[in-house]
Image (cartoon, grey):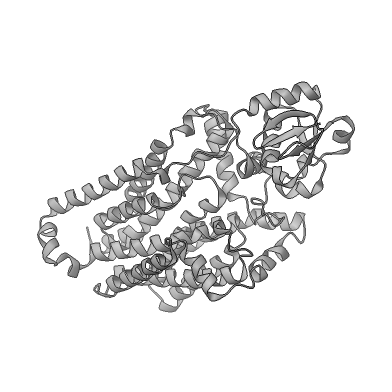
Amino acid sequence: MTQQGVAARRVTLDPAVFAVAAGALFGLLLWRNPVTFGRVVYERGDFAANSIITADAKHFELLVGNYSRLGFHHPGPAFFYVQAFGEWLLHDLLGVVPTPWNGQWVALLALNSVLLGLALAVIHSWTASRAATALCGAAGILYFATQPAILASAWMPDLYVAPFLLLLIAAASVAAGRVAHLPVLALASGLLIHGHVSFLLFVPVIAGAAVAAALRTGRREAFREVRTAVAVAAAVCGLFALPIVLNLLLHWPGEFARYFAYNGGGGGGVGPADIARYMLSFYASPTPLAAVIATLLFAAAAALTRHLPAGPPRRFLTAGVCAAAVATLLFAVYVTRGVDDLRFTYVGQFSRAVPLLLLWIAVAAAATSPAVRRLPALAAVWAGRPVAAWLVAAVVIGALGVGSGAPAMRRLPEHVPDMPAVMAILDRYTAGSPVVLDVQQEAWPALTALVVHGERMGPRVCTRDPRWEFMVTERYICTADDLAAGRELRLTPLPPAGATVITPVDDSVLTS
């Protein structure tokens, strides 16, 4: 292959690397979660609330994201169109999963696998070493095996980890001169902005800095390649912007005032020690151990990268260390200004991508470093190429073995197994009339479950209180006809004194 051909191959993403990485991870997640195809899931709580708007996405009517506990919707519906596609393909069309939600779940497992596969393909495009990429993949599996159940989860805070990791890696690639990877950066940016309002802080700064660095350094690429990459990135950005713009035009001025208020004044009254403890909690626990791990990861990534010879790998990995540092600084700003209660660790869950980025940088730098390969303990191994290949294969197989048994790779969603019986009782009690609910705050997980499964099994369930619209949408706020024809019930954690219990549902009860 000519030198020009080698350079072109390194700039583009290797389809084989992407396919193997994404396919292996997807297979591991399905192997660890056979319930995706084998168990009936009747979702509740947040999962049921997401199913409500996924139904709108199936008809291409959804323009907003998931609800916030602060009473608004996050900017965009991208994740729910992925869930809608999984529900339509696997449940409605093929019938290979037992319930609609199972189809949504499989689609989200596939999304996580695709995003991490893209991240590894970007790393490979710079290192040009399948061994280094495979070792990074093994390190990633081991990392996720020691974390909470992130990759197998359909909970929104967990879904931001993979795209945030891809954002940082794609930003490092673009900043180091690979304008061809702009579409990957646009994909990660769009998913994050759609997913949560907090990324209106992170994405413009990180992506903007990457583009500015690429323009400033003036790395040369063929004009056709740059033009194509910019056009594809613009198209991706336009696709993600479309529902947000439409929602603004149809519901002017939308919720952007709340978004800026969220990012600009949520926190307060917390000191530097509280912020540091919160940030370090995503590395490890207790805090002193987390501080040691964070320091070692940054130091190892920076030191190993610094000792690489000048060239593309060093340039990219240096940009990766900078991306991790910028993300950490922005996270500190977000914790200070945007997190209203530091007990809510889930709002910072996405920052678990930073330790993995640093781990990948250290592994990639070590695997491609001539100085490391010359160490007495490794020189003999790397001198014999077949031996080195078998060693890398053994590490990968070992990591897959650990992942196949790790509890963190398995996640059974919250659901209500007896929901068909509940709906049958309601149908008999109401004789097919709508169920008009008065809902106590603590019973909200049962509310969303009743709404979703009422739509699927009947009877219709709605709530008379319009304050629940942010969670169940306007469609399930009782109309005048519902109030006139429906049967009124109360949904509470415990039955009120003297009330007649119709049926328990989830952790609550329905009373007349």
Q: Which quarter of the picture shows residue 358?
A: bottom left
Examine the rendered structure and indicate whether residue 490 appears above or below residue 155.
above
Picture quarter with the C terminus: top right
In front: 111, or 61? 111
Residue at image point 65% right, 57% down: 75
Task: Kindly tell me whether residue 224 is visible in this rendering.
Answer: no
Residue at image point 74% right, 45% down: 473
425 left or right of 318 in image: right
437 left or right of 314 in image: right
Position in image of residue 384 (x %, y %): 10, 55
Position in image of residue 273 (x %, y %): 52, 73
Residue at image point 14% right, 67% down: 375
291 left or right of 247 in image: left
Picture quarter with the N terminus: bottom left
Q: Which quarter of the picture shows residue 127?
A: bottom left
395 left or right of 430 in image: left
Q: How many marks?
A: 0
In front: 326, or 496? 496
Position in image of residue 10 (x %, y %): 31, 60
Residue at image point 76% right, 47% down: 468
In front: 335, or 197? 335
In front: 429, or 108? 429
Position in image of residue 390 (x %, y %): 17, 48
Examine the rendered structure and indicate whether residue 44 appears above or below residue 300.
above
Q: Hey, which residue is sitting farthest front in the picture?
A: 497
Task: Kindly tell me whether residue 116 is visible in this rendering.
Answer: yes
